[in-house]
């Protein structure tokens, strides 16, 4: 089936809402179909099963998310500016789509190991964006050479991940974007020169 067709996008968007509001395990295909305003059978023209929907949600939504972040960071010169842009974009995109944030931060963690394996394939390209920023920082003498780049990446990703999860758990009562500068400062003081 052609994934460019409008119903595919309709189903993906509906799945994000249904999974965020009901949890992955309680999100029946029929609920997703109802939210997408399509017949239950239409879902199976595009997806094999509910797991395939979740993987597709992640590939589509996070693929677009990663592409936007990659494009925005590539417009910056220094590693520090790229990191600040990455943090800002990460927070902006997830705060603009709380349903997607719930799915990526909370629901994906409750999925089966096979599902997480598929999802991790998509996530690798995001980690690559971080790795490129870190490598540039090391090469341009902006980031300390005595630090393990993998640990730096884990610190960046872990910090972003935890701050978004906390924001969700606190019912989004504050602005994620307001934290970007402070998070950037905290991270850069740790491993930048």
Image (cartoon, grey):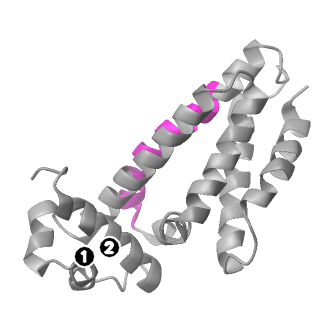
User: Which x, y percent locates residue 173?
Assistant: 73, 78
**157 relative position to 62: left or right:** right
Which residue is under mark 1? Answer: 36
Q: Is residue 95 magenta?
A: no
In the picture, which quadrant includes the C terminus? top right
Range shown magenta: 112-132
Q: Secondary structure at mark 1?
A: helix
What main secondary structure does the magenta stretch of the protein show?
A: helix
User: Which x, y percent locates residue 184?
Assistant: 81, 44
The part of the image, by quadrant, that contains residue 37 is: bottom left
Q: Residues within 10 Å of mark 2 (few under 14, many from 20)?
A: many
Q: Is residue 114 magenta?
A: yes
- C-alpha distance separating marks 1 and 2: 5 Å
Which residue is under mark 2? Answer: 14
Camera-side residue of 63 and 111: 63
Question: Which label sits on residue 191?
Answer: none
Asked whether residue 148 is in view, the answer is: no
User: Which x, y percent locates residue 183?
Assistant: 82, 50
User: Which x, y percent locates residue 119?
Assistant: 41, 53
- Dot 1 and dot 2 residues touching (CB under 8 Å): yes
Residue drawn at x 89%, y 38% is: 190
Give the vertical position of 179 relative to 111 (above or below): above
- Marker count (numbered): 2
Asked whether residue 17 is in view, the answer is: yes
**24 relative position to 190: left or right:** left
Residue drawn at x 62%, y 32% is: 73
Give the vertical position of 83 relative to 137 (above or below): below
């Amino acid at each position: 089936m052609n994934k460019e067709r409008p119903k595919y996008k309709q189903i993906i968007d509906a799945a994000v809402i249904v999974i965020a509001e009901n949890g992955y395990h309680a999100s029946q295909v029929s609920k997703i179909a109802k939210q997408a305003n399509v017949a239950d059978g239409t879902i199976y023209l595009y997806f094999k099963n509910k797991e395939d929907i979740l993987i597709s949600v992640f590939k589509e939504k996070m693929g677009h998310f990663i592409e936007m972040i990659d494009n925005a960071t590539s417009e910056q010169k220094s590693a520090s500016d790229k990191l600040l842009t990455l943090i800002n974009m990460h927070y902006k995109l997830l705060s603009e789509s709380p349903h997607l944030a719930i799915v990526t931060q909370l629901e994906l963690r409750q999925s089966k190991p096979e599902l997480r394996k598929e999802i991790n394939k998509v996530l690798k390209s995001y980690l690559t964006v971080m790795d490129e920023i870190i490598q540039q920082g090391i090469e341009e003498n902006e980031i300390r050479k005595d630090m393990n780049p993998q640990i730096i990446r884990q610190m960046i990703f872990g910090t972003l991940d935890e701050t978004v999860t906390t924001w969700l758990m606190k019912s989004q009562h504050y602005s994620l974007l307001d934290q970007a500068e402070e998070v950037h400062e905290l991270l850069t003081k740790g491993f930048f020169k």
